[in-house]
Image: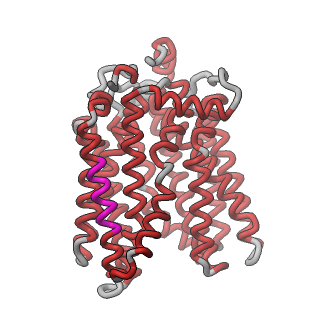
């Protein structure tokens, strides 16, 4: 379904390519990402200090996952219905309120945190998911390039760059002031985004045709299933995230286990994590500079081969820290090279007024298998324990990596995916003509 040319002209007249409004909006979100990441770090430290339980930390992850993935079609419908800019304003206001609540509970002292941290985490995850969907949809409204890959590289760079400083900020404020100060900083950065959104005008009229939220969510899913190219792409990414989830926790455990015999478990995991963060930044910078020159089929489908064979199989085939670091860097560079054009495909090929519901459905279909796959990977590791802990972890990581590589090969051979990933020639092509 092509975009409404008249609406595109109205938006182009308000926010032209290169206008500072785009950088103002995303710059404010970059600062907010720093605050949110620092608050997440501080919350993890405080919950663990109060409970001493890994289960309590896992519960936080589960609550956030349910809100961000499984509720995404509903939050996407809500964003479409009230208008994307209003949804972004409301999301940032909710995030600020939740952070103030976290600060108050944190300042109240031990014994009170867990009573409210889970509801606030769920609320924050819902708001963050809605905000992410609306900001992704805003790119098509604010930019008129036929190929949005490089623009998505720039937004990734703005979002991922500040998060490197988050642990430092979170630890410093927690130690020198109080953990509650980190949450107040997070609230202030969210309010800064509200101020930016009051200045930047980019919204399209609300889509109020569907009043029932479940019907709206269902229609977003149905849109994807109705078009062969997007449908096959999401089937591929559902399988890719299944394989990724199986290997994810085993990879962390493998680095911790074998690191204990070298520089230490903590130091090994820290080096591995820092390498991954550096890879994300390097990948975002590469895409921002040259992303539109990389063929989309290679960047999206072909990348799965590298993710599996280098990021998983090569890592699990050795005990050398240098190889782990290289694998972490390469994997995360490739994730950025894959993610930016993938997002661009959905921005370019979906109706702008319905992108919230469709992008929410995309998230559910593509990432819905990941959480149960992580549990499956843990169960497989336990089942293979008679082989020895190291061997069991290696088998699970390599199996997940080979699964990713096989999915990549299947996606490369799919005619529907190949047609969908053809180089764009107009701001919004009809996806129905892109997949056979």
Q: Is residue 85 visible?
A: no
Q: Can residue 200 be seen in this view?
A: yes
Compare residues 203 and 396 and report the one nearer the observer: 396
Q: Position of residue 37 (x, y in %)?
A: 53, 60
Query: Can you say which quadrant of the picture contains the N terminus?
Result: top left
Residue at left offset 65%, top offset 21%? 209
401 drawn magenta: yes
Q: Position of residue 334 (x, y in %)?
A: 29, 51
Span shown in magenta: 396-407
Residue at left offset 54%, top offset 73%? 172
Which quadrant of the view contains residue 332?
bottom left
Looking at the image, is 357 positioned above or below residue 129?
A: above
Q: Where is residue 27 in the image (x, y as percent from the top left)?
A: 48, 45
Q: In the rendered view, does 410 fall on the left or right side of 42?
A: left
Residue at left offset 46%, top offset 20%? 12
Compare residues 175 and 75 and report the one nearer the observer: 75
Compare residues 36 and 13 and report the one nearer the observer: 36
Compare residues 301 and 205 and report the one nearer the observer: 301
Magenta segment, principal secondary structure? helix
Which quadrant of the view contains residue 396?
bottom left
Q: Where is residue 174 in the image (x, y as percent from the top left)?
A: 60, 73
Residue at left offset 37%, top offset 33%? 345
């Amino acid at each position: 379904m092509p975009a409404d040319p008249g609406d595109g002209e109205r938006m182009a007249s308000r926010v032209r390519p290169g206008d500072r409004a785009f950088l103002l909006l995303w710059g404010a979100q970059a600062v907010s990402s720093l605050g949110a990441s620092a608050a997440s770090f501080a919350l993890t430290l405080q919950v663990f200090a109060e409970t001493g339980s890994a289960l309590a930390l896992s519960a936080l992850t589960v609550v956030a996952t349910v809100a961000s993935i499984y509720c995404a079609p509903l939050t996407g419908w809500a964003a479409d219905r009230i208008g994307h800019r209003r949804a972004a304003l409301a999301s940032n206001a909710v995030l600020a309120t939740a952070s103030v609540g976290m600060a108050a509970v944190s300042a109240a002292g031990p014994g009170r945190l867990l009573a409210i941290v889970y509801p606030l985490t769920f609320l924050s995850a819902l708001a963050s998911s809605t905000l992410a969907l609306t900001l992704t949809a805003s790119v098509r409204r604010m930019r008129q390039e036929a190929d949005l890959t490089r623009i998505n590289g720039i937004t990734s760079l703005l979002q991922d760059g500040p998060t490197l400083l988050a642990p430092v900020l979170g630890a410093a404020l927690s130690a020198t002031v109080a953990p509650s100060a980190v949450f107040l900083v997070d609230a202030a950065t969210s309010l800064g985004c509200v101020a930016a959104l009051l200045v930047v005008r980019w919204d399209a009229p609300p889509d109020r045709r569907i009043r029932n939220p479940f019907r709206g969510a269902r229609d977003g899913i149905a849109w994807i299933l109705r078009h062969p190219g997007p449908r096959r792409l999401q089937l591929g990414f559902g399988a890719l995230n299944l394989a990724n989830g199986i290997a994810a926790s085993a990879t962390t455990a493998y680095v911790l286990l074998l690191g204990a015999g070298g520089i230490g478990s903590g130091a090994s995991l820290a080096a591995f994590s820092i390498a991954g963060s550096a890879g994300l930044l390097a990948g975002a910078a590469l895409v921002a500079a040259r992303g539109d020159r990389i063929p989309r089929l290679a960047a999206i489908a072909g990348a799965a081969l590298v993710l599996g064979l280098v990021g998983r199989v090569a890592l699990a085939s050795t005990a050398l820290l240098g190889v782990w670091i290289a694998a972490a860097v390469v994997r995360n560079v490739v994730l950025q090279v894959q993610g930016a054009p993938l997002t661009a495909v959905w921005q370019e090929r979906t109706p702008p007024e319905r992108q919230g519901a469709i992008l929410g459905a995309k998230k559910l279909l593509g990432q819905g298998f990941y959480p149960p796959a992580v549990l499956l990977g843990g169960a497989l590791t336990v089942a293979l324990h008679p082989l020895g802990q190291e061997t069991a972890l290696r088998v699970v990581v390599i199996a997940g990596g080979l699964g990713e590589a096989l999915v990549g090969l299947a996606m490369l051979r799919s005619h529907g995916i190949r047609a969908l990933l053809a180089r764009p020639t107009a701001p919004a092509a009809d996806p129905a003509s892109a997949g056979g």
